[in-house]
Amino acid sequence: MAFTGCDQDELDIPQKGVLPIDNFYKTDADAEAALVGVYFDTHKNFAKSDDEYNYGPIFGLTNFQSDNMYLAGSGVGDCVMQREYQQFRYANDNPVPLAAYTAFYRSIHKCNLVINNFTEEKVGTLSPTMKRCIAEARVMRAYDHMMLGIYWGTPPIVEEVLSGDSRPENAESQDAVMDWVVKEIDLALPDLTERQGPDDQAGAVKITKGFANAIKGKALIWKGDYNGAKTPLKAVITSGNYALLPSEDMIKIGHADGKATSESVFEFNVTPDPDVVTSEPVQRRAGWNDHMTFNWRFENFNGNLGPDAQINNNGWGWLNPTGKFARDLIANDGMESARRKAWIKTYDEVLYDHQWESDGDDFAPGRTAFKETDPNRGVGGNAGFIYGNEGYFCWKIVVHKDQGDLNAINGGWDRNLSLMRYAEVLLLYAEACAQTTDDDGLGLQSLQAIQNRAQSDYVSSSLTLEDVQKEKMFELWLEGTRSVDLIRWGKTETLEKQGYYVAHLRDELQEGIGGVHKAYIDETDDDYPATYYLDEYGEGNIGFKKGKHELLPFPKTVMDLNTALEQNPSWN
């Protein structure tokens, strides 16, 4: 055997196709490229988890515990871990909080790469472009920390790129997190651009002063500083850069044809290229799985929808509105309101206003004698019922027929991921005024603007916190505010009974108990979750527990890795 040696320098061969880090973070183009990494990676991680769960981590975190939706699917054996989270049966190893926690800190890491590397010490004088990129990264980092603070209370505030041996400690308090968020926004605001009016689509898909002020206002409301929150929120409202969509366009909210509208304060823009995006895992990053997750489950129908049905394609049926929410919405808004028609459908509308295959080519919307007794339409199918459904169907985020074919790369699943809508800004401002004073009447005007646009039968004549809370429940349904708002307001009664009642939708005609189609609510095992999931004392181990569920536990994998992190109270 022969041994030879060489100088160490001869072994340092540059990797082809990779730019050494010492040669990056120097120019305006580098700053823009690094910022693109913030947008791309943040959206990717917010919209799809590593383990191919059938929903976006941020959507799951912020919506699955809401008291106004059923997490349905095919039954108790479907979406098991997600249902565990929904019913407050979770431990600190549940994948729903873990996926979101991971997504937030990945976003923070990308932001820190911009903020930490473009400094005067490293690059000399910062150009306006570099300052703007730093400012946008600051706002995104502030949003991440705000959300972590809302759900976990005292998450580590991470301002540096962490190394493998970093062990960041808890923030001092939830208020301290919100104070830090406000400080970050104030540092960013001078270098941010403004959206150039309600029609500026580019200004809706980038971080601007409007989004920054909205986040600042929300953080202050979470801290309970309602007077302080009014100033940044009012700045968004009076800027003239945002406007509610007309009533007839409410149907576009949350959909592929509702990108970058006048109502968007900030959303991630997705433009898939069919020449590039071809593999299913990549497609799912862009929202395809969200739509499949929440689209109606056609196997539960006794017959097939026809080619002119309004619904697009089969799905997994994970989400249905609760009967209480649907009935309350109808009682408040009226059946003919724009919001009711955009948010939910009744079973009768599914039966009679959608084309079914048995209609042939002579379909027209409306009830007829043939449709009432047609055995090839309505609920039935493999299971004979729809789990977690009281005769109402989600319409707000499922794919509509005119938005394309789910099996192609087009508008069928190409929707944007929204982080802030103007309607939420108006409602946050109305709440801040209801909690303090509404000196110029703008708080009441903001609330009424939401109600009038919805074409609601109920329009407030005075500004009350109760009206704001009710309106926020209706307007921001499935937009990630409900459960944490109830906790913040101390109104957790409905969360304490979360999962105690789960009814199923059957059809009287298909069941042989009626001569025409009619929704039949099957309650034979409606209390199954409450009686099945028992704790060590034989009591129902289900529902929100005061003193425990106000905050989520830090995930087990995070606690195992970071010995400096202290677990939240009552989760030890």
Image (cartoon, rainbow, N blue to C red):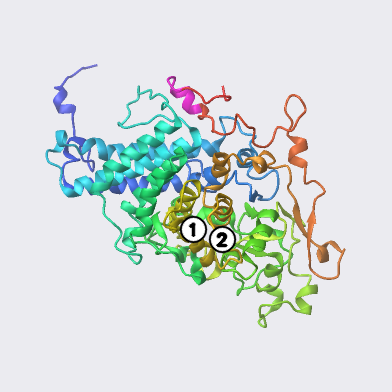
**Residue 517 placed where, x, y %?**
79, 68
**Alpha carbon of mark 1 to alpha carbon of mark 2: how far?**
8 Å
Marks 1 & 2, CB-CB < 8 Å contact: yes
The N terminus lies in quadrant: top left
- With 173 as the anchor, is 163 left or right in this view? left
Residue 255 x, y percent position in the rendering: 49, 62
Report the magenta residues as a range.
557-565
Question: x, y (%) of residue 457?
Answer: 61, 66
302 left or right, relative to 138: right
Q: Along the horizontal axis of the image, is 271 left or right of 1? A: right
- Is residue 563 a member of the stretch shown in magenta? yes
Q: Position of residue 101 (x, y in %)?
A: 46, 36
Q: Label 2 is placed on what type of residue?
A: Ser
Q: Residue at coordinates 63% horizontally, 44% vertically from top-left?
A: 79
- Give residue 444's mark: 1
Report which residue position mark 2 lands on.
460
Residue density around tag 2, few if under 14, some if 14–19, many if 20 or more, within 10 Å: some
- Quarter of the picture holding the C terminus: top right
Measuring 60% from the left and 43% from the top, which residue is drawn there?
65
Location of residue 569 (image quadrant): top right
User: What amino acid is found at the position of numbered circle 1 in the picture?
Assistant: Leu
